[in-house]
Amino acid sequence: MWNDRVLPCLIHAVMRSRRLEPLRRRVAGAARGVVLELGIGSGLNLPFYGREVERLVGIDPQPRLLARARRRASWVPFEVVLYEGSAEELPLEDASVDTVVSSWTLCSIAGIERALSELRRVLRPGGRFLFVEHGLSADPEVARWQQRLTPLWRAVAGGCHLDRPIPALIERAGLLPQSVITGYLVPGPRIFTYHYLGRAVPPSAGRGGGAG
């Protein structure tokens, strides 16, 4: 009951906050070409995608949230294809997308290493991974509290981790983080609000500077 009915409603209510919209706009607004959105949820990023998006593929494990996303998708000027599933097994061919978008998603994927490996597999050479994620604070005291509270928080918040070092995880997957902004980017308790906003590219794009 909690995971199937209550939690999706709570996620939608929290994530639709207007204070998150500037971050959504910066991430989704920079997408182009064929786009994959990990954890598309109820489709809250859809209004922020620009004219350079040709097609959007969204994946999420929550059918109730996907139903909301389908309703929102009927109003956008590009094709939207939605899949119920996990980012750990993407139903896409190798090197088939130009942009991968993730907003407040990497915190809750159980097999994060596998998901990032899949992300890299489907990203085309010269493509970009655009992300905004909360995670491990640079403040040691805040980080200690995040590590203490994560087991309890994960149990009630759909697997959400407060203490994931997002750029380090991205690098381990073989992608190169670029232009990453860090800090308490939204108001609220510091254990929840330390964020990473930026992009990552495949190594060849990073060496050549072709990511734009």
Image: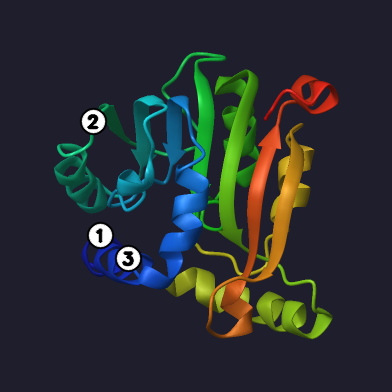
Q: Secondary structure at mark 3?
A: loop
User: Quick check: can you spot residue 99?
Assistant: yes
Q: Which residue is mark 3?
A: 16
Count neighbours of disc 1 (C-alpha within 10 A) and say few if under 14, some if 14 to 19, many if 20 or more. few
The quadrant in which the C terminus is found is: top right
Q: Which residue is mark 2?
A: 77
Answer with left or right where residue 7 lies relative to residue 146: left
Residue 104 appears anywhere in the view: no
- Label 2 residue SS: loop
> Can you tell which quarter of the image residue 192 is in?
bottom right
Query: Residue at (61%, 22%) from the top-left corner?
Result: 121
Q: Nearer the viewer, residue 62 or 53?
A: 53
Disc 1 marks a residue whose amino acid type is: Asp
Residue 116, by quadrant, is top right
Amino acid type indicated by mark 2: Pro
Picture layout, residue 66 above or below residue 96: below
